[in-house]
Image (tube, rainbow, N blue to C red):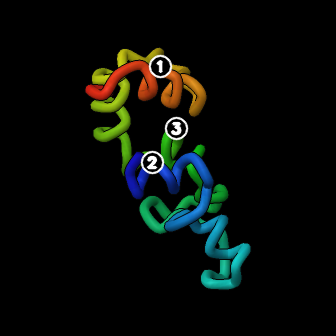
Amino acid sequence: MSFHLTQVLTDHGCFSKYLHRIEKKADTTCFMCGMDDEDDAYHTLRECPMWDTQRLDMRKKLNLARDFTLGDVIDNIMTSRES
């Protein structure tokens, strides 16, 4: 378990949606891409264009399908220490 994985699993942390909910940010737009979509764990893992390179690396390393889910990531990570 790591700091960043904990943020993804709980949807808390540096996501604008969460920061807006606790009144630390005025809106829910993404810090990275500026899209008006809510910036949450799903946006970061699946949609944000600023994370495309890291997303591709993660998909290759974890052998994930193009349309992976958060559940797929968790299932794969739990299979071995290397994951």
The x and y percentages for residue 38 are 66, 58
Question: N-terminal of the two: label 3 or label 1?
Answer: 3
* 73 over 8 or under it: above or below: above
- 67 shown above or below 49: above
Locate residue 10, reporting x and y percent.
61, 53
Tag 3: amino acid: Arg
Q: Position of residue 20 (x, y in %)?
A: 68, 75
Question: Type of residue at label 2?
Answer: Leu
Residue drawn at the location 47% of the way across and 15% of the way down:
65
Q: Earlier in the sequence, mark 3 or mark 2?
A: 2
Q: Secondary structure at mark 3?
A: helix
State how many labels appear: 3
Say which residue label 1 marks. Answer: 66
Residue 63 in the image, given as x and y percentages of width and height: 36, 16
The three-letter code of the residue at mark 1 reads: Arg
Assess disc 2: are there few (<14), some (14-19) or many (≥20) residues with their C-alpha within 10 Å of its C-alpha: few
Q: CA distance from mark 3 to mark 2?
A: 15 Å
In which quadrant is the C terminus drawn?
top left
Tag 1, which secondary structure?
A: loop
Residue on which the image places disc 3: 46
Q: Which mark is residue 5?
A: 2
